[in-house]
Amino acid sequence: ATFGTLSDRLADTFRNLRTKGKLSAADVDGTVREIRRALLEADVSLDVVKAFTAKVRDRALGNEVSKALNPAQQVVQIVNEELVGILGGQHRRLQFAKKPPTVIMLAGLQGAGKTTLAGKLAKWLVKDGHTPMLVAADLQRPNAVNQLQVVGSQAGVHVFAPEPGNGVGDPVRVAKDAVKYAERQQYDTVIVDTAGRLGVDAELMKQAANIRKAVDPDEVLFVIDAMIGQDAVATAKAFQDGVDFTGVVLSKLDGDARGGAALSVASVTGRPIIFASTGESLDDFEPFHPDRMASRILDLGDMLTLIEQAQEAFDEDEARKVAEKIASDQFTLDDFLGQMQQLRGAGSLKKMIGMLPGAGQMKQQLDQFDEKEIVRTEAIIQSMTPAERKNHKLLNGSRRLRIARGSGMTVTDVNQLIARFEQAAKMMRTVARGGVPQIPGMGPI
Ligand code: GDP
C-alpha cells in the first residue's frame, strides 16, 4: 500500500538509531542520508527532500537533541514534526459560503478521480446535514454525464446536466445555469465536475479557468492521483498556473503509490490537502489530517482516524459505553469481540488494522488476514467462562489449554489472541487519556 516501503525504510533507520545513547554528528548525518534516500525512492520531489532533510539535520544537531533524555526518540519526534509541516501543518476544513449555495469546483487530469470524488463529497456532505447538488460540466468525455448520474444516484443526490441538444458543448453555461438553479431550489452546495485530459493542455486549462471565472467558486479542489509519482509536481504546478486552486484532494491513496505525490504537492503549491480518497466505493473518503498522515507514514499508527471510523461503524450508544469502559480500565474480552464483530459490519477491518501502530511490520500477516480471523476470535472467546471474559488476568495455563480444546484452536492461538487484546486495551487506554501510542520498544515519544 501507499507509503509501505517508505514506512519500512524509515522504521529501519530509526531502529538503527535506537541502540545508541548519545548521537554523534556522524550518527545524525548517517540518519539524514538514509531518510533522504528513502524519500527520493518514494518519488518525493528533490526540492522538497532537500529542504526537509536540511531542517531535520539542523534540528538533530542542535540543543533539543543533545539535551534530550533519549536522543533517538527526539530525532523521531523531529522527523514527525517536519513531516507534518510538509504535509501542510494543520488540518484545513472545507470552506462554506456565508450565503449559500457554496460552490465547489473540481479540476484535474482525466482519470484523476474527479467524478468519483464528486459522489464521495456529496455523500459526505449529506451525512453532515447539507443539501448538495452535482453538476455535469464535463462535456468532453462521451460517458462523463452518465457516469456522474450513476454516482449521483448512489449518493442519493440530484444531478444537474444539460438537456440533450441544449447547451451541449458549453460547460461554462451549464455551470452558470446550475448555480442559478441551486439558488432557486435551495441546494446549499453545488459540486461542479469539470473535464480532464490525459495530459495537461492549454485548452483544458482555459476551459477550467473560464468556468472558475463564471461561477466564482468558494473552493476549487485540484484532484490528483497519488499513483502518478514524479509527475505530480509538474501537473500540480500547471494547474496552479492555469486555473489555480484553493485545496488539493489526493486520490487512490489505497494503491501502490510510493507516496511521493502526497509528500510533495502541499509544500510545492502552498495549498492544503483537504481530503484523501482511498478506494472506489463512495465511503472510501476522509478529511486529510497532516498529523495523522505523518504518524501513518512513521508507522506510529493512526489512532484518531481509527477511532473515528470505529465510532461510525458502531452504533453510538455502544461507542459511548466502550469509551467509558476504556477510560475506566474496564475494557474486556467481550468488548473486544463486540468491537471486532461491529468492525466486520463496517467491511473495512483490514484497512483499520493497517492503521494500528506497528502495522507496517505485520503487513504480510495483514495481507493474509481474512474474515476467518474473526471467526477464530469468536470461537476462542466464546469458549471462555463469563468470569474469564470479564477478567483476562484469570487466564492461566490450564485455563488456556481448556479454551484451546474447547474452541478447536491451539494454545498458541489463544495466547496470541490474548496478547493482541492486551495490546489493543493498552493502546486504547493511552489514547483515551489523551496520550500518544508508543512505538514498541521505544517508549512514549
Ligand atoms: P475522472 O476522470 O477524474 O472523473 O476520474 P474518475 O472518477 O472517473 O476515476 C477514474 C478511475 O479511478 C475510476 O475507475 C474510479 O473508480 C477510480 N478511482 C477513483 N478514485 C479512486 C480511489 O480513491 N481509489 C481507487 N482505487 N480507485 C479510484
Image (cartoon, grey):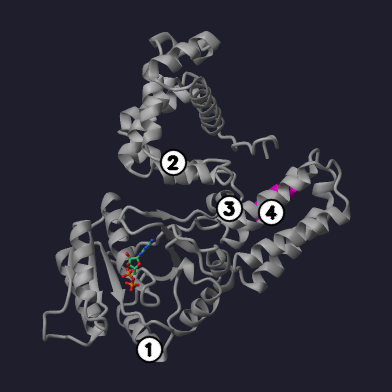
Q: Secondary structure at mark 2?
A: loop
Q: Earlier in the sequence, mark 4 or mark 3?
A: 4
Residues drawn in magenta: 74-81
**Residue 310: % across, % down:** 39, 38
Would the CB of label 3 be found within 8 Å of ligand 1?
no
Question: Which callout, 4 or 1, points at the residue further toward the start of the chain?
Answer: 4
How packed mark 2 is, by other alpha carbons closer than 10 Å (few <14, some 14-19, many 20 or more), is some
- Say which of marks 4 and 2 sits in front: 2
Residue at (36%, 18%) from the top-left corner?
382
- Image height check: is 212 above or below 281? below
Residue 46 at x, y = what percent?
A: 66, 73
- Cα–Cα gap, marks 4 and 1: 40 Å
- Pointer 3 residue: 297
Crowding near the residue tagged with mark 3, few <14, some 14–19, many ≥20 C-alpha atoms within 10 Å: many
In the figure, residue 107 lies in which quadrant?
bottom left
- Residue at the (55%, 27%) spot, across then down: 426
Viewer-side residue, 103 vs 133: 133
Amino acid residing under circle 4: Val
Rendered residue at 35%/62% (across/down): 96
Measuring from the top left, give residue 256's x and y in whole percent: 49, 61
